[in-house]
Structure formats: structure tokens, C-alpha cells
Amino acid sequence: MNTRTTTGLVLLAAAAPALAQTQVTDSSTSPSADSHASYAEDTVVVVGSRTPKAISEIPGAVWVIEGEELEDQIRTGADLKTALGRLVPGLDLAPQGRTNYGQNMRGRDVQVLIDGVSMNSSRGLSRQFDSIDPFNVERVEVLSGATSLYGGGATGGLINIITKKGDGAGRHFSTEAGITTGFNDSNDIDYRLAQSVSGGTEKVNGRLAVAYQDNGRQYDGNGDEIFPDIAQTDLQDNNSIDIMGSLNITLAEDQDLTLGAQLYRSKFDGDRDVYFPNLDAPVPNLNDAEIRDGYSSDRSPATERTMVNLQYHHANLLGQNFYLQAFHREEEASFHAFPYAAGDELEFATSKQNTDLSGIKALFDAQLGDSVELTYGVDYDRESFDANQMYFDIDTTNASGGLEQKESRTEPRYPSYDVDTLSAFAQSSWHVTDALTLGAGVRQQHMDVDVDDFRDVPGGSNDYDATLLNASALYDWGNGNQNWLQFSQGFELPDPAKYYGKSPEVSVDANPLDAIKTNQVELGWRFNNADWMTQAALYYAWSDKAVTNDEDLSVSVIDEKKRNYGFEASATRYFDHGIEAGGTLHLVRSEQKEDGDWVKRDARYASLSSATAFVGWKDYNSGRSARLQANHAHNLEDDENRQIDGYTTFDLSMAQSFDVGTLSLGIANLLDEQYTTVWGQRAAMFYSPYYGPEYLYDYKGRGRTYTLTWSMDF
């Protein structure tokens, strides 16, 4: 038995008495089983129609991840994207680093929002989850499948993160502190600390919270230090702070106003990185690299975001519900120093990419008679983007083996651009009978793209339109069963930064971007009663064009048909004495058409099928709980024999409540599985051999870790 395993068992033995000191007096004391069915029917979400609506009224697969479910995952040391990948059936398991590239839903892109404000942008940075600490998340609402409700980017689904707000009158405090380690080395340790305060009156109340996370180094299942992700960056030696505030004001009996603001900073803050021993050789190469101390750089990986959000609701404006939202988001994303060929030498450089997004949304919700509801409105937003590339002094880099990066010059990285979007939409539902509801909707979106000159490539302007339709039928059998049939459309936009500026032949004026539509049909089923909470859907999605990466990682739009089809499901069975068991399943097949035949889609883009299974126990009388969970990603092989190897991990969490809070112990990757993350395997396909040997991008999964957390509300 190795040292870290022994130390881990010592921690378990020390924690066990605390987790088991209270005898069970009435193990059946818990919310009644009937409440599960009632909850599933009555839960109100906004993700399905942009207005509050019960899940039972939505003709589509909707998943709600409550704060308690998130806590079960966070207790094992998981971050937000990892937790959601385990809990949402159609969402891929998380890639683990800073990036969420390839974490698709139903095999296609997913749009991520915080309180209705999109974290996506035209420039696909794949950092939507590096945006908020789970401490500030109340719940997460997820809509599976293509949708046009919030604009472009949601060809696979929509994730709306709902933040915590004030708790009403009086003062309320919440505290959380945690530590995670794999006992491999003194630097293998992560810290968490969070504090919130809320209070006010019945008419005015607010919440202010600060959450801080400090990560150390990470080690794989063999106990070896994980090689940094030099392509998209990881979260080793990273610290983050999330400061979030909200103010809720009741203006009148039928009017309320919510103000929200967030400051989020996530940045590498270490002195350990990759050392390349052959940079000063007569023929420099990137072989035989290792991890060493002594790193310093004039630009380090970071995500910095500032956001303000205002939401106004009038319950009786012209006899209708009226919702108004205005928002502004500023974001900077910096990357790791990356090697590029510079003649006979290697030159390291890194980019910083800046996005500003401002917008306003207005929506009316009208009841037309007893059976027809109409929702309609207008959205407008402006997105501005610019980026620069910092190059590092070659002599300094070579002399230090890449550990010391001193700026030599800074140049534009991509063309700067502005995108103005104006959309109008209408969505209706008709209750034909008590059991049958029909729905239909349309969204018309117009976008103006203005691109600046870039190097020797002239800029220009163009515009395009997208018309998106949906139609649905929902039938309630009256016995806990519901079925729906739905057709819906969504669209994605090629990345303007990587599409333009690569060649004078791709002029802005003569090559307008075009919305790449995804069409989807879905057949779904829900069933909820005292013992079961289930939901499942069969889907088929297709499009006539695709975005692909060229060898230099610029993008092109090709006339290539692609399709995804599959099955997603979630089921939970509730037993007596607080025991529950269940799991999720997503079977997906991604294909592209070549020479008239459907073949497996490129492994760099295709999603892996996945499954989870769990057994849990909660005793609300004694305050104890435990959960054992398995997470499995299937193997994937494309038509060119490129393969992604799947993996299986197990997680265990236990908790005990006391008068002074709750103490929890979580063990992630319980069996110490050794594997390469899905992103690590994809990165090797993207970057090697063009940007260096494969091992540089072989980003490993973290081995077994132990997380001890104390939390308290008072």
C-alpha cells in the first residue's frame, strides 16, 4: 500500500466517528415519497419558455439541478461543469481543465447563461463554466435539444444558471470551508472558503457573497504530476474569487425589480510549469519536457469577467405580464504560452481575447381567453471583440527552457469586430383539451457584422438573417405519464475571428456569414409518482453545413451534412427509509455525409455516449447522508480510426449535520483510475504533430482525492 493511500485511510478513519456518532432514532423520517411526484409536476422554470412555467407544461426534456444535488457533487471536489456532466443526461462528461470545449449536449453546442445572460460569444472560447463559483448557484435549469429561445449557439441545448438571492426579511449568513488533497505531495492541496450575508425587509432585501478557491498541483492515478494543458490551460496553481451581489426591490404589489452584479477572477498563480531542455539546441525541438519550478511570465492564463444585470417585472401591464432585462458583460481571457515555428527557431506566444456584450430584452406574456397563451418580444444586443498576441523574447525563452517568458512585442491576434443582433419572436400554446396542448413559435433574427482591417486583409461589413421555427404537441395521460412530440430549430455562427483575417481571398464583404441551422425532432416521455421520477427522449438532429478547423486552427464552413441521433434518460427510484437509487444514460451517434454515405463523425468533434449510476441514503432525522456514484464514458472511434478511450470512475460522499453546521467527506475517483481526459485525447489530435509531439497534449485525469468540507447557515 503506497503512502498516499495509507494517509487517505487515516483521514477516513479520523472522520468516521464524527460521521457516525449519532444513532438513528427514526430512519423513515424524511419528506414523504408523494412529495417527489408533486415536486416534479409543480416545479416552475424559465428555461422552457423564457417565462415561469411548470415542467409539466413544457413539451420537451427539461432537467432541474437543485442546490442540494449540486452539493452532493461539489463535496467530492467537483467543479460546476463536472457536476452538471454527471447530473444532466444529454450533457457530455466534463473535460476537467479550464476549458469546456467538446462538452456538448446531444452532440452539439450548448448555450450557457447566468440569470438569462449568455456566457457564449461569437468567438468560441469554451470557458462558459469558468464564470461562477458553485457557492453562488441556487439551481441550474437545462433544456435539451435545439432551441431558438435565446438566440444562436443552442443547437444542442440550453443551460441557465440561477444565482442565489436574498432570503427575505432579517439577516442570514452562510459559511463554507473546504480542503481537497490526494496526499501525493505538499503542493497537492486545494482550499475553498466562502461567505455570504443576506437580509433586509419584505420590500427590499439583498445578498452579498464572496467565494474563494485556491488550487495546488494535481496528480494522476499513478501518482504522477499531471502535465499542464498548454493549449487551453487548466486549473492547477489557479486561484479564483467570485464576488456576487443582488438587490430585490418590490416597487408595488404587481411590480418588482432585481439588480445583480458580479466580479469574477480566475488566474494562474504558480511558479511551476513546463521545462523544455532542447530549445537552445542547433535544431530546437519540444521533446523530453518535464515540470519544474522557476516559471514566470509577463502574461499568465486567466479569465476575468464583470457583469451587471437588471430585471424588471410588471404583472399587469396592458393586462399582460411584462418582463424587461438589461445587461452588460465584459470578459478577458488569457492563455498559456504556446510554441510556434519561427523560421528555424521556436517562438512562444500567447493571446488575450476581450469580449464586451450589452443587451436588452423585452417580453410580454398574454393569456388569450381560457385556452391560448401568447409570449412575444424583442431582443437586442451588441458584441464587441478584440484580441492581441504577446510574443516572448526567444533568447530568454531558450536560455530558461521556456520557464521565463519576457515580452518582446504585442500584435493583433484576430480581426476585431462588432456584431449587432436584433430579434423578434412569438411563442404560443393552445390547450385543446385538458390533456392535449399544442404549441408553435417563430424567431426572426437579423445580425450585422462589422470587421476591422487585419494585417494585409481588409475589413468590411455584411449582414444575414435567420428564421427559426418550432412546433409541439404535449399529451398528459392523467396518471403521472406525459408524452410529447416536438420539432425545433437552432443555429450556430462560424467564429468571425477565425473565419475572417486568414486570407485576402476571404473578404468580409463578399463572404457574409450564414446561420448554420440545426433541425431536430424529439419524442419524449415523463413519468412521476410516489416511487419514481423519470424522463426520457429519443431525438434526431441534422444540418446541411458544418464548421471545421483547418491545420492552422482557423475555421472554414463546408457543405457537409451532419446528423446526431440518440436517446437520453434519467430515472430515480425512491425507497423507504430515505434510500434512493438511479442513474442517467445518453446514447449518441454522430455522423457526417461523405461521397453520398453516412460515416462516423470526426473524433475531434463527436460526443461520447455516457452513463452514471448511484445509490444514496438520506436520514433527515439524524442529518446523515451518503452517496456512491459511478460515471462512465464510452469508447469512440471515427471513420479514420481515430479513437478516444472511455473510462469509469467512482465517487463517494458522506455528510453529517450538527448544531454548528454540516461536515462532509468526499472521495473522488475512488478506485484511483488512470486515464487521459477526453479533452487531452482530442487536443493531441488537434495540435500534434503540427505544434509538437503528442505527449505535450496528453492531459490526464486526476487520481483519487479526498475533500473535507464544513458548511453552516445561520
Image: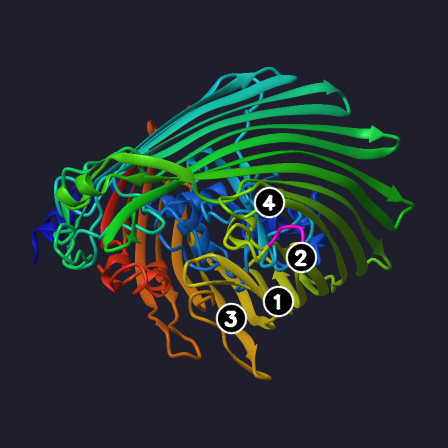
For the residues carrying marks 4 and 3, which lies nearer the camera in this image? Answer: 4
Q: Are marks 1 and 2 in contact (CB under 8 Å)?
A: yes
Disc 4 residue type?
A: Gly
Q: Which mark is residue 545?
A: 1
The mark that comes first in sequence, 1 or 2, is 2
Which segment is the magenta one?
507-511
Q: Would residue 378 be found to the left or right of residue 86 on screen?
A: right
Instruction: Residue under label 4, please give it.
Output: 459
User: Is any atom of residue 26 visible in this view?
Assistant: no
User: Is any atom of residue 220 visible in this view?
Assistant: yes
Mark 1–mark 3 distance (CA, rounded to whole Å): 20 Å
Disc 2 residue type?
A: Asp
Mark 4–mark 3 distance (CA, rounded to whole Å): 40 Å
Q: Residue 19 carries which label?
A: none
Q: Quadrant of the N terminus?
A: bottom left
Expressed as whole percent of the image width and height from the top left, the position of residue 709 reads 30, 37
Instruction: Residue under label 2, please give it.
Output: 514
The mark that comes first in sequence, 2 or 4, is 4
Up-down relation of residue 303 to residue 148 (above or below): above
Coloration mode: rainbow
Q: Quadrant of the C terminus?
A: top left
Q: Residue 588 carries which label?
A: 3
For the residues carrying marks 1 and 4, which lies nearer the camera in this image? Answer: 4
Q: Would residue 394 be found to the left or right of residue 376 on screen?
A: left
